[in-house]
């Protein structure tokens, strides 16, 4: 019997909570449920631990500021602060405000406070322009201005509308945000997967822009909105050189490798995903809080562990946690801090009441930066508070070069639907809506001075400040020059990449670098835009036959569609040995040709491959041959061989044992679906998952499988749940009728969850859980030990979610689906339909990740239609493959730290 690897996409979701016991059974006394009181401004500084050598002061507090989530300084040094007072259930009351704060003498304390604009629904983004501010409040971006100098907005204009749609605009954790003046003199923003079809209501000629999986920027004069690479959840920042960074809940710092406008596109090459996690301690890195668990969380956890209510068990039982609510990433390049802090990243974690700091290094031999703690051994943070009310939401570098921090200061940060009613009635979810703090952080020896007034400066003075080392000074000077019609030049890229992406000549002089650095390789391949360039590159990389560069180059050559060049490359490869790299080059060449709709055999000819096919067959007949070589041989035979390799592949399948990768490769290479179904017991579950879509979309194969199930020759527990779902929903009437006859009815998810809740109370064993993971999850997830397929999210992103939450996600995977894990059906013009996730999109292409972890890129012209299914790729029905005890052990493994 083989291992089972049914695809289990564990989604890191915030589930709605439903009590399974009557409210009367969950009563709790006030004595057992004390609320944590707020710390008054006069006493709050004693709650903090701050990096040695720094000091912190309270720049503003209630009633002069309330619920601040973002701030920006204008040219006079005044701060415009966004107040999201309608959090978390009062959007329609339009309690949001823009507050104007003034520090007259530069001592770090705001002396004046006034309401600039009120009546906003959940405002989330703000930036200055021409004496006013652009403000984002889904679904709109407004321009607000005070025209008579009384400090109150008297001009309001909607410049863009259409962000979010339906319930998306009601999701407070996914609202567009972070309006920033960019290095190219445009205003940038993050959509937080809350994009939409955005239009300009004042311009009938404006072509609406679809923001799906993209951030945005716009010229504040022309209002020419364009889609940009992205997106993340809450936070976006530029460093001093114009590099962009974003963050999401459990991805605390993400480098944007390149921007769309920097690329001179190559129709034969698809660039890598521009969003890259760069922390050396992982996207969901450890954080070290000192604040206690709130009493209501302790009570709720106790109820959840007891199984009387559903929902997340915070922290997964661990004292130290991982990033779960990263927010407001800010690249500091002010002049107040010592030089070693320049271009450091500061990230808030509102759930853990702390501010995390990362140093960002650019290795000499690599384009990609690395973010790391300055001292990896220290288990502390740049700033952390023992006060649970401390909620660091965003940062700004001030006119004085200091770091300013907005603190929403709320008793409870939690989705209201996640709270059982017996607990919720003891909470005031509005508690703190009349509170808020802003802090200034400086070195201990910092000397304050009045903020400069750039508004009164002449153009020449501003030009002298356009490269000032302080973030606010430089950015504001550049903005003012733009406003006056004399813009400073956009900041040039400081590294060869991404500037190389705009090259109009082939980068053949970068061949050596391209072989070792994936980003230089991307620029190198993107620069090859003629068949002559490709031919020369193939010749000049002859001594790099074992490199990834040759693999990628082979695909570009295939995509070029040049028959003469393809034939030359194919002849060279056919004369080689079937090593893993050579086979990858052949696969890449054919993949490229398929993209270009060029027939493989008509260009390469079948006869020239026969010696290579024979050599591959010989590899499979060598006892105890190297597994990698066997897999390469199998892939080659599946790609090139016909009937002559049938017996060899069938024998290989029967002797492949439990080698997951080899077994899967053989299953994919055997094109006889009925043979594979007849030998289902010889397939590992990864192999079954990899061929499920093929079987389920084939009428004859589906009927044959149902015949086997009906005859009792294949147990239902041996069939992937995703395949059963596909067969149940087949459009073939004969398959549909037989499925109804043979397959059991779908069981209510609520009933299944109720049955498996016993797993929450059983004794567990982590090692058995590791085995259960290999059996049930590794077809879609990578384990703590690095084994498995990268389709669903990594364990680190949900390890702290708690057993109850994971149990619900596993058994009811479609209750709520995060946008990035929503399954889509793609109808293609020349291929069978594909069920997959969207991993990245550009105006010309879409990249999909299908079951098995296979990524494919298609030109949009080849996609007939695409439709979201409103559900994940994770199938229902996993309970057929795991006992209650196995589920208990699996949950123990998932929630345990990596070892």
Image (tube, rainbow, N blue to C red):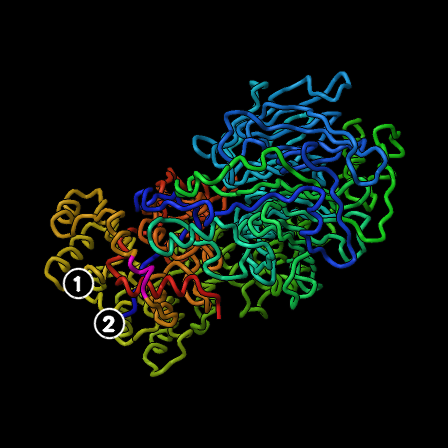
Label 2 crowd bin: few (<14), some (14–19), many (20+), radius 10 Å: few
Q: At x 43% / y 30%, what residue is drawn? A: 166
Q: Nearer the viewer, residue 208 or 623?
A: 208
Q: Nearer the viewer, residue 507 or 178?
A: 178
Q: Position of residue 201 (x, y in %)?
A: 56, 20
Q: Position of residue 361 (x, y in %)?
A: 70, 60
Question: SS of the residue at dot 2?
Answer: loop
Q: Nearer the viewer, residue 698 or 380?
A: 380
Q: Is residue 828 found inside the magenta-colored segment of the image?
A: no
Rendered view: 676 above or below 438: below
Q: At x 58% / y 44%, what residue is drawn? A: 37
- In this rendering, position of residue 62 left or right of residue 525: right
How far apart are the two marked residues, 1 and 2, measured between alpha carbons?
12 Å
Q: Nearer the viewer, residue 65 or 245?
A: 65
In the rendered image, which quarter contains the N terminus? bottom left
Q: Position of residue 845 (x, y in %)?
A: 48, 43
Which secondary structure class fits the magenta region best? helix
- In this rendering, position of residue 560 left or right of residue 656: right
- Disc 1 target residue: 714
Question: SS of the residue at dot 1?
Answer: loop
Q: At x 82% / y 46%, what residue is drawn? A: 469
- In this rendering, position of residue 141 left or right of residue 574: right
Q: Position of residue 352 (x, y in %)?
A: 57, 52
- Chain part drawn in magenta: 758-762
- Disc 2 target residue: 1
Q: Is residue 761 found inside the magenta-colored segment of the image?
A: yes
Residue furthest bottom in the image: 623
- In this rendering, position of residue 2 left or right of residue 170: left
């Amino acid at each position: 019997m083989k291992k089972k690897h049914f695809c289990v996409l564990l989604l890191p979701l915030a589930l709605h909570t439903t009590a399974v016991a009557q409210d009367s059974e969950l009563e709790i006394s006030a004595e057992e449920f004390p609320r944590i009181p707020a710390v008054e401004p006069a006493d709050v500084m004693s709650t903090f631990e701050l990096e040695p050598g720094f000091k912190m002061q309270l720049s503003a507090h209630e009633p002069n500021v309330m619920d601040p989530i973002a701030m920006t300084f204008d040219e006079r040094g005044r701060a415009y602060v966004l107040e999201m007072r309608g959090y978390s259930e009062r959007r329609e009351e339009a309690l949001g405000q823009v507050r104007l704060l003034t520090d007259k003498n530069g001592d770090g304390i705001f002396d004046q406070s006034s309401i600039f604009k009120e009546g906003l629904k959940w405002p989330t983004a703000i930036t200055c322009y021409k004496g006013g501010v652009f403000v984002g409040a889904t679904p709109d971006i407004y321009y607000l201005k005070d025209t008579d100098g009384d400090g109150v907005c008297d001009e309001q204009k909607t410049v863009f509308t259409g962000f979010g749609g339906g319930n998306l605009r009601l999701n407070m954790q996914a609202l567009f945000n972070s309006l920033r003046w960019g290095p190219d003199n445009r205003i940038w923003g993050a959509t937080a997967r809350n994009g939409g079809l955005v239009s300009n209501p004042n311009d009938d000629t404006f072509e609406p822009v679809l923001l799906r999986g993209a951030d945005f920027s716009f010229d504040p004069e022309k209002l020419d909105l364009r889609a940009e690479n992205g997106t993340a959840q809450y936070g976006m920042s530029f460093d001093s050189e114009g590099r962009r960074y974003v963050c999401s809940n459990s991805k605390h710092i993400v480098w944007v490798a390149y921007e769309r406008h920097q690329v001179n596109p190559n129709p034969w090459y698809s660039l890598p995903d521009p969003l890259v996690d760069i922390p050396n301690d992982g996207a969901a890195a450890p954080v070290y809080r000192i604040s206690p668990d709130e009493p209501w969380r302790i009570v709720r956890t106790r109820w959840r562990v007891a199984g009387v209510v559903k929902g997340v068990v915070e922290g997964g039982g661990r004292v130290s946690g991982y990033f779960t609510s990263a927010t407001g990433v800010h690249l500091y390049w002010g002049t107040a801090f010592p030089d070693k802090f320049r271009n450091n990243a500061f990230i808030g974690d509102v759930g853990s009441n702390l501010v995390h700091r990362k140093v960002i290094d650019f290795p000499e031999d690599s384009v990609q930066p690395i973010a790391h703690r300055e001292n990896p051994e220290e288990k502390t943070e740049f700033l952390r508070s023992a006060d649970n009310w401390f909620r660091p939401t965003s940062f700004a570098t001030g006119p004085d070069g200091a770091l300013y921090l907005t603190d929403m200061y709320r008793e409870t940060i939690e989705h209201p639907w996640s709270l059982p009613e017996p607990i919720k009635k003891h909470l005031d979810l509005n508690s703190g809506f009349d509170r808020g703090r802003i802090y200034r952080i400086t070195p201990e020896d910092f000397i304050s001075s009045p903020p400069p007034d750039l508004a009164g400066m002449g153009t020449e003075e501003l030009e002298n400040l356009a490269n000032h080392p302080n973030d606010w000074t430089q950015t504001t000077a550049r903005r003012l020059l733009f406003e006056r019609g004399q813009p400073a030049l956009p900041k040039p890229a400081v590294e060869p990449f991404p500037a190389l992406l705009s090259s109009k000549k082939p980068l053949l002089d970068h061949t050596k670098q391209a072989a070792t650095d994936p980003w230089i390789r991307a620029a190198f391949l993107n620069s090859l835009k003629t068949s002559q360039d490709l031919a020369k590159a193939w010749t000049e990389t002859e001594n790099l036959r074992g490199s990834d560069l040759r693999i990628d180059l082979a695909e570009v050559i295939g995509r070029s569609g040049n028959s003469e060049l393809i034939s030359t490359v194919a002849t060279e490869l056919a004369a080689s040995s079937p090593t893993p790299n050579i086979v990858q080059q052949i696969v890449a060449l054919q993949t490229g040709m398929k993209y270009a709709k060029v027939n493989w055999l008509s260009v390469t000819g079948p006869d020239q491959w026969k010696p290579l096919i024979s050599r591959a067959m010989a590899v499979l007949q060598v006892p105890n041959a190297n597994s990698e070589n066997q897999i390469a041989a199998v892939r080659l035979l599946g790609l090139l061989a016909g009937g002559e390799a049938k017996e060899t592949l069938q024998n290989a399948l029967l002797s492949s044992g439990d080698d997951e990768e080899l077994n899967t490769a053989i299953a994919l290479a055997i094109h006889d679906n009925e043979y594979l179904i007849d030998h289902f017991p010889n397939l590992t579950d990864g192999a079954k998952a990899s061929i499920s879509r093929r079987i389920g979309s084939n009428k004859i194969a589906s009927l044959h499988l149902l015949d086997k199930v009906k005859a009792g020759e294949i147990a239902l527990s041996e069939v992937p749940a995703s395949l059963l779902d596909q067969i149940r929903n087949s459009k073939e009437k004969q398959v549909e009728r037989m499925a109804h006859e043979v397959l059991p009815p779908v069981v209510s998810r609520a009933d299944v969850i109720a049955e498996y809740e016993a797993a929450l109370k059983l004794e567990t064993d982590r090692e058995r859980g590791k085995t259960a993971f290999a059996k049930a999850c590794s077809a879609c997830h990578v384990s703590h030990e690095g084994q498995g397929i990268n389709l669903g999210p990594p364990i680190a992103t949900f390890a702290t979610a708690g057993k109850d939450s994971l149990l619900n996600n596993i058994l009811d995977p479609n209750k709520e689906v995060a946008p990035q894990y929503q399954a889509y059906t793609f109808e293609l013009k020349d291929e069978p339909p594909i069920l997959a996730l969207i991993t990245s999109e550009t105006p010309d292409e879409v990249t999909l990740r299908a079951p098995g972890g296979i990524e494919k890129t298609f030109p949009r012209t080849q996609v007939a239609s695409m439709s979201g299914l409103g559900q994940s790729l994770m199938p229902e029905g996993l309970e057929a493959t795991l006992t209650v005890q196995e589920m208990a052990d699996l949950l123990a493994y998932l929630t345990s730290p990596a070892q």
